[in-house]
Structure formats: structure tokens, C-alpha cells
Image (cartoon, helix red, strand yellow):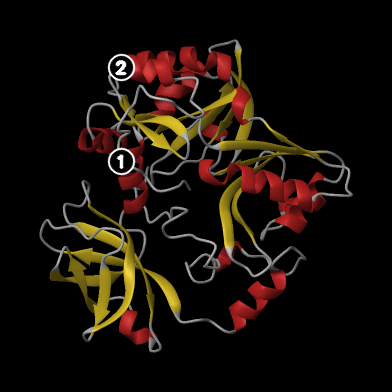
Amino acid sequence: MQAAVPGPSAAPDGPAGPSSPLEATHRAAGATMTDFAGWQMPLRFAGDLAEHRAVRERAGLFDLSHMAQLEVTGPEAAAALDGALVSAASRLRVGRARYTMITAIDGGILDDLIVYRLDEHEFLVIANAANRLTVLDELTNRSEGRQVAVVDRTPHRALIAIQGPAAAGVLAPLIDADLSALKYYASVSASFDAHVPTLVARTGYTGEDGFELAVPAAAATDVWARLLDAGAEAGVQACGLASRDSLRLEAGMPLYGQELTAALTPFEVGLGRVVHLDHEFLGRDALAERSEHPTGTRLIGLRGDGRRAARAGSEVLAAGSVIGAVTSGVLSPTLGHPVAMALVTAADQDTVAVGQVLDVDVRGRFQQMTVTELPFYRRPATT
């Protein structure tokens, strides 16, 4: 749930847009910085492969402070969100979270979001950095006339994620909450290191177990350093946005700006399950129509052999005809072979069924890739 990962900034010391409260810490650690939706953020620290493997095998620490943190509060907060989002926020129990979307009146995806219900009349909406103002404006406009306040807390908070099989063991001694009782897509208010007010959520974007911590911006440096120190023996590493991108791709998680755009509805990208058509919201009529009359466009997974990875924009062909394009692709560090997601349009859906072999134009050479189920990677079950 973030915009596409760009290349490193050509002039990291030049004029900058918004910055994380951890920017100076990242630069001191030797991170390669990048302009990301106007924010100066770390692209990598030790290296993409090392950081990717750290998350899969141990744990990685991510700075996500560029993500928008929007509070929606008031007696009609739940009703306002019901009318604004494709999922009914009023059905969330206090302490639970939901992955959802905000769409235009034509059903096009404006952003994918996570909504946390913190109290009966208090919600936190996490949006993508590139869409922060769009979502803020839409929530404000769609709440007009209701007893609701929509407030952007992004400049005053940091968001830090610790992800991987060692995450719970590292974080548990630092938090005065029972992490073993915290379910996936649930949150709890707690204190970090006995003094930092923290919202702890068991959510993430890597395919591993892990936690996201919303803390005051002023405390971010101390929280980051404490987590790295506490996790040193377990091999916790600072990680950048590049490894986060390869991790989420292996886990089959869509990226706004690549798999998700305003030209697509949730149904084209295999996320119709998040749409609750039994309640009224902006875009409902268009989505109800789309659910009954599919366009033939769908998001598929592709698995290749060898070492040459397809990249975003690579054409996908069936029987010599172009049927779509890759949206994200990588040589999977975990699986050892190329994987990709692609948006394709086929009148006969058997053409793109699981097991079918398609041709992908990888830098001027056709390469066969097999349609496969998403996700490509699932973390091992714990006992």
C-alpha cells in the first residue's frame, strides 16, 4: 500500500520536500536517500538483498513516516466513513482494523487504505503518501454536514514498522501490552519503553508477521534506536523502501500507482471482496454495475524461469497478441526465480487461467512465464 519505489535522489543534499523525523538518523547511518512522493526517505541501507533476507529470516525495521495518518473523530465518524469508503467502518469492533479503499463516483480507485477503529467515535485512516491530500480532501468533503472532524496528524507523528519472524520477540519486552493476545489486523494503545505513547498494530506490508508503531514525531529517533539496539542480537536490520517493494511483491500485495489506479476498480484487481455493496457509499452504483458486468481485465501472477526479471511495462502476449502489461516484477530473492504481477484483458478467461503459459517481452526478448496463483510467497505456519 504505497506508491511505486523510485530511484535514488540525484541530489540528496538539495532542496527537499517533507521529511521524516528520522531523516538525519538515516543519513548518519549511510542510507541511500530518495525523493518519494515529495518526501526524503531511505531507499536502502546495507543493500536490497540483505535487507530483504533479514525480514524473511529475522526482522527488519522500516521508517514509514511518509504514510498519511488521518484522524476521523466525532459522534458521526462511523457513518461518515461508511459513506466515504467501499467497506462499512461501522462494522469494525473497537481495536480492529480493515484494509479498504476510497473510490471516485465511477468506481475508480483513489487510494487503498487501512482503517483502525480506536474507540467508538475515533478512527485512524492510513493512506499512501502520494495520495495524502486527495484522501484528506475527499474524507473532509464526504463528511460535510456531519458531526465529524478530519485532522491530518502526519506532520506530528512517525510510523515505524518491525517485520519478520523475530519481530514479536524483539518488541514484546519494550511494550506494556500483551502482543501474544494481539490478533492480525488489530491494534492497542500502549507505552513504548515505559514512556512513549504508542499505537501498536499487528499489520504490515511484507508478508511476514510484524507490527507498525505510530509514535509522536519527537520520540521517533529514540524509538528507532531502541528497537535496533534491542534487536541487535536477533539480527534486526534497518531496511529501505526497495526491499519493502520486493517483499510486498512476493506476498502478492498491490501497490498504488502500479497495480491500483483511478482507471481501475477493485474488481479488476481481484479485490472485490473489500467492497460491501450492502451499504451506501460514493461509487457504489458504478461498482455494483461492474460486479455484474466484468470488463475482462484482471490482475494475474506470473512465474518465470532463469534469472531475467520482467519489469513494469513489459508487454504480455498470448498467441502472439498483446493482452496486457506487467505492473510489477522482480527476481524473487526468496524463491530464486522471476515473479511478476500483470494486468491483462482477455475475452476468454481460460487464456489467463492458472497454469497457462504466456509470453512476456523482457527487454526485447520473449520469455515464457506461467500464470500462477497469488501470493507467490506465504510465510511458514507457526506451531
CB under 8 Å between callouts 1 and 2? no
The residue that appears at 77% across and 53% down in the rendered structure is 142
In screen coordinates, is 306 left or right of 131?
left
Outermost residue toward the bottom in this view: 348
In screen coordinates, is 65 left or right of 87?
left
Q: Dot 2: what SS? A: loop
- Residue 317 position, x and y percent, is 25, 78
- Residue 316 position, x and y percent, is 27, 73
Q: Specify the quadrant of the image occupied by residue 266.
A: bottom right
Whichever of labels 1 and 2 marks the residue nearer the N terminus, that label is 1
- The vertical placement of 106 against 51, above or below, is below
**Quadrant of the image for the C terminus?**
top left
In screen coordinates, is 110 left or right of 376?
right
Closer to us: 227 or 352: 352
- Residue 34 position, x and y percent, is 36, 33
**Number of labelled discs?**
2
Closer to us: 96 or 179: 96
The residue that appears at 31% across and 35% down in the rendered structure is 55
The residue that appears at 25% across and 59% down in the rendered structure is 339
Q: Is residue 64 visible?
A: yes
**Mark 1 residue type:** Gly
Q: Residues within 10 Å of mark 2 (few under 14, many from 20)?
A: few
- The vertical placement of 231 against 289, above or below, is above
- The vertical placement of 8 against 79, above or below, is above
The residue that appears at 45% across and 23% down in the rendered structure is 171
Q: CA distance from mark 1 to mark 2?
A: 19 Å
**Mark 2 residue type:** Ala
Q: Specify the quadrant of the image occupied by residue 306.
A: bottom left
Q: Which residue is mark 2?
A: 29
Q: Which residue is mark 1?
A: 7
Q: Dot 1: what SS? A: loop
